[in-house]
Image (cartoon, grey):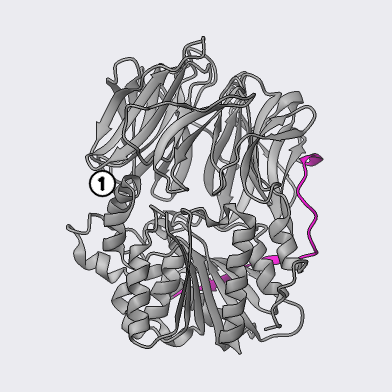
Amino acid sequence: MKEPQFEDGAPWKRRFRAPVILWSQLAAQEPARGLVCTNQSGMYQLYAWDVPTGELRQVTDRPEGMDRGLLSPDGRYVYYLDDEGGNEQGHYVRLPLDGGPAETLSPELPPYSSFNISLSRTNNFASFVVSDTSGYHLYGLDLPAGGHLGRPRLLYSSPRLFWGPSLSAQGELAVIDSSERSGKLQYSLVALDTSSGQVVAELWEGPESSLNATFFSPLPGDLRVLAKVNRGDEETLLLWSPLTGKQEELALGGMSGTPNVYDWSADGRWLLLSAVDRARQQLSLYELESGVLTRLEPPAGTFEGPLFAPGGEIFVRWQDAAHPKRLIALDPATGRMTRTVLAAGDVPPGRPWRSISLASAGGQEVQGWLGLPEGEGPFPAVIDLIGGPHGVALESFVPPAQMWLDHGLAYLRVNYRGNTSFGRAFREQIWGQPGRWEVEDVAAARNWLVAEGIARPDQMLLTGWSYGGFLVLLALGKQPELWAGGLAGQAISDWRLAYELSNDMIKGYLANLFGGTPKERPEQYAASSPMSYVEQVRAPVLIIQGRNDSRTPDRPVEIYAGRLAAQGKEVEVHWYDAGHNAEAQVEQSIYHHELMLRFAWRVLR
């Protein structure tokens, strides 16, 4: 490992500070108005976006940062969860983009956790899911043309987790993804009349399938909803008409992998689709009338959030391993880049990644992204575990990855079991037993690096945040002989205690992931918890944890670190006063990674 660079102008710090376009939205009714999340102020905040000129104007200034929001179809408001210091518990508000105070949508309700709010395309109705100790509740409220908010009314409740909703263009129907039938992370679609809350239809294909609603048709009066359906290893898209029961599957013969719907054109004719197959992306246009699928060819790298833009263009956020995320325009006929819409900051040259494949336990093939530093190996190495589960690591601009590469470490980001785009069996194998197969895949990745002559076996570090942080701690306890050190952020060390202290949305998700609550499956919660293996840990541990995090609470980490210390083991915990989004504040993130560099330098020397 090269001696760490801590000077203010170090290349790795410049990459962290480079402005990026985290996400962008266009107003459905006024596409000349948009909303952007960027870190150009040194912290992620929301910005009003004048689309024709590209001008950005900051509209939020929260001390913990702000990286979530929903632009109203008329482009006048941004809706977001107003929480306490990033703890993801509070009330939805709407903030006028042209100035004025935020209005609370639900002042009558106690503070709640919620991950989604939806607006009808005609801007007359809003709906959101909240959770409490009794279960999950869908609320709706009218948005009269005069601009005044209606009172939220309860539409639907269930003791089981559900997601959504998707709203029809005029808000008369809502569709949610319900786990009530399965009790697992498999969903049926439940359609509700938003004026009465009455269930009007349900689409359920049995325990071997799962459905997720995406978009209703943008046309008023067209009450078809587009849904993803998973049947075994078959993943496709279908149009469902809740009032008639009619179903129509899309002809996706030219598309492989996990399909995703990103946008439905305002005239109702076209869909903008992508698919991810073994961590590789495809982008396509689908014409609904003819059923013709046209493959597009965007630039190599990774794209996010493609959408139909004014003037017939397609906007996407693009990045690769060496270039930060920016918004670009594509030719709708070919998918080729035509211009940069919103630029990212300049960064020092970075090292490329390449896709690799390796064999894990049970003969399972596992994919990862490998970056190599300058020089000849074997190198010290770091294996990075993404959060999740049920995400997927694509080729992305990851400042910490380039930081490690700058300092002479090989870098490997692993798509462990549980991640998507590798088939249903790969994704669902972790259900009921989180951590078991993931750490097998991590060990296989470590052994592959050694066998290939890339990494030194005595200088292997593990790092990860959130679910990745949990896997770091679990691997240190279950495979103590393999690792020189572990660097975990926002980690979970005890699933039972985390369940008790987490927000109510997370509790429902965990019950589905584990196949029951801690009272129903105490042995599995213990078997999946790093706390159960604390006596076996040999390697030094660094943990970075938030004091205001309702997803990965602080108390379990306090206990875990205390037990390590009581046994004379090397453990360092750094606390910060924010919630789960530790990286919203750029300088705080740089400080956290300075701690990680100092830890790695000490451990590897």
* Residue 293 showing in the rendered view: no
| SS category of the residue bearing label 1 | loop
Q: Nearer the viewer, residue 412 or 592?
A: 592
Q: Is residue 126 left or right of residue 95?
A: left
Q: Name the amino acid type tagged 1.
A: Gly
Q: Which residues are magenta?
A: 336-360
Pointer 1: what residue? 183
Q: Is residue 17 above or below residue 341?
A: below
Q: Is residue 512 left or right of residue 47?
A: left
462 magenta-colored? no
Q: Residue furthest top?
A: 146
Residues packed near mark 1 inside 10 Å, few (<14), some (14 to 19) or many (20 plus)? some
Q: Horizontal and vertical percent for residue 568? A: 37, 88
Q: Horizontal and vertical percent for residue 15? A: 72, 60
* Residue 427 showing in the rendered view: yes
The residue depicted at 55 percent of the width and 82 percent of the height is 460
Q: Nearer the viewer, residue 276 or 322?
A: 322
Q: Is residue 68 above or below residue 384?
A: above
The residue depicted at 72 percent of the width and 73 percent of the height is 406
Q: Quadrant of residue 98?
A: top right
The residue depicted at 43 percent of the width and 51 percent of the height is 233
